[in-house]
Image (spheres, rainbow, N blue to C red):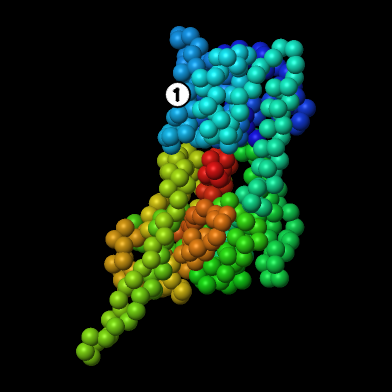
């Protein structure tokens, strides 16, 4: 739960803050600024559940209070993607006559204007009612039962490395007759993010798609993701790199056609892209060399190299590859190909085809071989570890943002 208060008279909110703290909304979850300029800076980086906006507020410390500053902020919140939109907005004013000119702007969007009072607590109680409703809805997830579902193709080493993350894992529980998940949670910017994790019954796109569909139907995640191991394209990536699949497709999709005595495969790849918002946030992890160096150093074994995060096309197929010539054929489907594996497209397709509430989706996998005759199992555990911990960096830093 995150609340932003925008008012140049912060002391008048002492009663409200005390009431919020009594309702188990800690002071650390409440930010206060005294002008709309500072409010914009906050809204650029923080996803707030509730914005409490003074109707008569300055733009900065130089300019005096004006209703136009509030109107300009509301317009920017509504009409641009530059600011993270709060889930709900309450206007507040000590003089309802002043607020008449802007009340319509609030009411058109079903927002409310409250009248501040030194002598009564009506405005405090109404704000508290709004905040507790939003908080309860966030805790239950609305139409969602869990924030993030993590699906791995293998129990070992992929799911094993996910369950080593410090996310308060519980014992397995069934979500249907064949799927068991481990529940966990973490705190991100004052919000509790709930997680469940499991592995598919078998490797491959079909098993992944079926398990992903079951998770989407049963636990209704806001986001479903995959971590694990994959093959990299030699010359594009190196051992131990973590690949973010964007786009993903089935490289075996198409049909075989005959031209006289010859038979030829006609490719018809259907590419699915990860959400742009998640990609942009992962780029921040990609560029944080210090964090990635520490990630590699913390591995309880020998890392093949300092992990890099590589973003690009990853192809899925139904067979394990150990043939460099086949890799070259797959590269013909996308010149920027960086990886090959067996499951990601199944996850993307299940999420892409899901009915409401449709989850966001992405996959990160660590490179453990190059899909050639020299492949081995030496780096599988590190690849699983690296992908799990890149996911950890993304979720612990930006979970609140990518879930919105």
Above or below residue 386? Residue 206 is below
Residue 328 percent across, percent down from the top left: 31, 69
Residue 208 percent across, percent down from the top left: 55, 67
The residue positioned 73% from the left and 60% from the top of the image is 172
**Is residue 146 toward the left or the right of residue 293 in the image?**
right
Q: Relative to the observer, which residue lies in front, 299 or 167? A: 167
Residue that numbered label 1 is attached to: 72
Q: Relative to the observer, which residue lies in front, 404 or 256? A: 404
Residue 43 percent across, percent down from the top left: 51, 30
Q: Looking at this rendering, what residue extends furthest in the right direction?
A: 22
Q: Give the quarter of the image for residue 129.
A: top right
The residue positioned 36% from the left and 68% from the top of the image is 269
Q: Give the quarter of the image for residue 173.
A: bottom right
Q: Give the quarter of the image for residue 226.
A: bottom right
Above or below residue 382? Residue 340 is below
Q: Looking at this rendering, what residue extends furthest in the left direction?
A: 260
Q: Relative to the observer, which residue lies in front, 292 or 114? A: 114
């Amino acid at each position: 739960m995150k609340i932003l208060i925008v008012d140049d008279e912060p002391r008048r909110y002492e009663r409200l803050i005390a009431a919020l703290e009594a309702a188990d909304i800690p002071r650390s979850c409440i930010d206060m600024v005294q002008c709309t300029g500072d409010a914009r800076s906050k809204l650029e980086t923080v996803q707030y559940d509730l914005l409490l906006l003074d109707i008569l507020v300055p733009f900065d410390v130089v300019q005096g209070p004006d209703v136009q500053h509030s109107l300009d902020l509301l317009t920017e919140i509504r009409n641009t993607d530059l600011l993270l939109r709060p889930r709900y907005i309450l206007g507040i004013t000590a003089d309802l006559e002043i607020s008449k000119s802007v009340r319509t702007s609030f009411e058109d969007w079903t927002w409310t204007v409250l009248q501040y009072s030194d002598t009564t607590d009506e405005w405090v109680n109404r704000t508290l009612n709004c905040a507790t409703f939003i908080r309860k809805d966030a805790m239950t997830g609305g139409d969602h039962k869990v924030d993030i579902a993590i699906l791995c193709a293998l129990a070992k080493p992929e799911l094993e490395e996910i369950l080593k993350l410090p996310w308060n894992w519980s014992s397995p529980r069934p979500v249907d007759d064949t799927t068991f998940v481990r529940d966990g949670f973490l705190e991100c910017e004052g919000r509790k993010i709930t997680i469940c994790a499991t592995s598919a019954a078998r490797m491959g796109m079909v098993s992944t798609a079926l398990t992903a569909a079951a998770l989407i139907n049963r636990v209704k995640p806001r986001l479903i993701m995959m971590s694990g191991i994959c093959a990299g394209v030699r010359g594009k990536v190196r051992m131990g790199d973590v690949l973010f699949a964007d786009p993903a497709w089935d490289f075996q999709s198409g049909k075989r056609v005959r031209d006289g005595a010859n038979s030829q495969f006609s490719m018809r790849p259907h590419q699915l892209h990860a959400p742009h918002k998640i990609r942009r946030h992962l780029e921040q992890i990609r560029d944080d060399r210090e964090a990635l160096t520490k990630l590699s150093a913390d591995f309880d074994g020998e890392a093949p190299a300092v992990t890099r995060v590589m973003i690009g096309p990853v192809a899925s197929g139904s067979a394990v590859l150990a043939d460099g010539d086949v890799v070259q054929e797959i590269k013909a489907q996308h010149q920027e190909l960086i990886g090959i594996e067996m499951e990601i497209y199944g996850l993307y397709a299940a999420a892409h085809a899901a009915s409401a509430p449709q989850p966001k989706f992405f996959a990160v996998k660590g490179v453990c071989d190059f899909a050639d005759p020299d492949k081995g199992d030496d780096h599988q555990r590190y690849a699983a570890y690296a992908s799990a911990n890149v996911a950890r960096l993304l979720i612990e830093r930006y979970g609140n943002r990518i879930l919105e």
